[in-house]
Image (cartoon, rainbow, N blue to C red):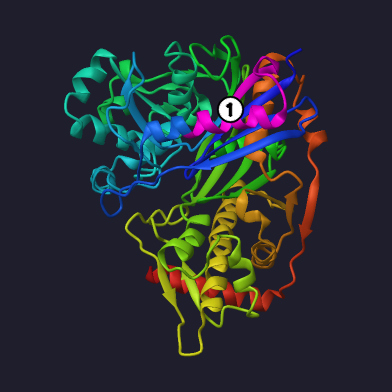
Amino acid sequence: MATHILAIDQGTTGSTALVLDRRLRVRAKVNREYRQLFPRPGWVEHDLEDIWKSVRAVVRKAISDAGIRPTEIAAIGITNQRETTALFDRETGVALHHAIVWQDRRTSALCREMKDAGLEPQVRKRTGLVLDPYFSGTKMRWLLENVPGAREKATRGDAVFGTIDTFLVHRLTGGKAHVTDATNASRTLLMDLRRLVWDSEMLDLLTVPAASLPTIVASSGVVGTTRGLRWLPDGIPIAGIAGDQQAAMVGQACFAPGESKCTYGTGAFLLMNTGSEPVASEKGLLSTVAWKLGDEVAYALEGSAFIAGAAVQWLRDGLGLIRQAKDIEALAGQVADSGGVVFVPALAGLGAPHWRPDARGLVTGIDRGITKAHLARAVLEGIAFEIVDLLEAMREDSGREVPVLKADGGACQNNLLMQFQADVLGSPVERPRMIETTALGAAFLAGLGVGVWKDREEVRTAWRRDERFIPRLDDSRRRELLARWSSAVARA
């Protein structure tokens, strides 16, 4: 009997496959990194074939490690890096250009032009988003204008756009399904946030042909079945899709208005459930779709820090201060504090609530007594400070307090970071036993889509806390640190 769920978590730096059983226990987990391409300063790309090969490899290995037959998979759930934008041939699935990654800043000038033309209020009202290179729509326009023949092919519908979920479903179904779910569509600058349809005025503004866009579907429900793959049998339903941050909300059981989570990955992403109506932000946050289950739609406020774990990778790969990412905790733990050093992680601009795409990383407070341990600690603290800015903006926009913040993602395993996060937030931080909440959310959406689970309460029941970090700083010290951070951000 097919009772296992395969979750594909296609992330910015690697692909992960998890096999879970009906009790939401992980039977196998496999991850594989792939190339990051940086053709010019500020440009970030992925080769779609690298992504596909990594997905194929981790799925095959996870099924093998789980000790099950592929026929025991009841459904596939997909979660993905969101705004990363692909343009590929509808029939063959072959890319017309490398995918443009969410971190890419090549459309900064276009966004600035549109802002200067007074278009941002219209964009915010329709989509819940701001004009920033982060989102997919301006990436689509760049591809249409810079890939030879792209506009003609897209207008005919021969070349099609999609975020990574769209590309994976297309490949998994042998080209039969061209879809995206509402959470991913809400990140494109092209979807009407309330009606959950492509907005004709936004398509005109960004000159994107409607024929090139996928069908918007619910986050849970069968959208296609596997077809023509040597490593999976035909007929497995693809029944759950959600952008990575929304999937993490499901995996963290943030089902009630006000419940919040932060995922610490390549970037850091804070989301608060706002219920059945979107909240218009006055603090530079985003209004986005949290999920769509049948006819039920939930919304969220979101704040994104573009650089979190990527700053640790920079210490490792760019500066050579650590050999492995996990080594940063031991290095930073060699000192009691950062020695007055402040690191602003604006390595790809600043996201919410600042929205300064041209900002650059900054290190302040260095003197002769500063060591690599102080710099490592300042990097971790910089990540935590970003989240404070986001949470304060979220509190003001929503009128809600956040009595506890749920943390997930790879970097949440860093106890020093989690403790400092609680200290500067002034609120407890909880880490779940299963930190792969993104994949868990995708698996649960897929299982709901085929009836393996009946309702959301099964995930809430399965959620277990690993550790709770309680704030230790007094208010005066917290205010001092936050003032130092604000001063550094103003100079970035």
Quarter holding residue 131: top left
Query: Within the magenta stretch, is there residue 274?
Result: no
Q: Nearer the viewer, residue 288 or 469?
A: 469
Residue sitting at x 78%, y 39% = 463
Q: Residue at x 34, y 44 (%)?
A: 133
> Is residue 64 toward the left or the right of residue 339 in the image?
right
- Residue 360 percent across, percent down from the top left: 36, 63
Relative image position of residue 50 (x, y in whole percent): 41, 35
Q: From this viewpoint, is residue 186 visible? A: no
- Check residue 55 for magenta coloring: yes
Q: Is residue 200 at least partly visible in the picture?
A: yes
x and y, in percent, of residue 431 in the image: 73, 51
Which residue range is magenta in the image?
54-77
Residue 314 shown left or right of residue 233 in the figure = left
**In which quadrant will I find the N terminus?**
top right
- At 41% across and 31% down in the image, what residue appears? 126
Q: Residue at x 44, y 61 (%)?
A: 317
- Residue at the limit of the structure toward the right, as seen here: 461
The residue that label 1 is drawn on is 60
* Residue 264 x %, y %: 58, 52
Asked whether 158 or 53 is in front, the reply is 53
Front one among 101 and 67: 67
Q: Is residue 139 left or right of residue 166?
A: left
Identify residue type, mark 1: Arg
Residues packed near mark 1 inside 10 Å, few (<14), some (14 to 19) or many (20 plus): some
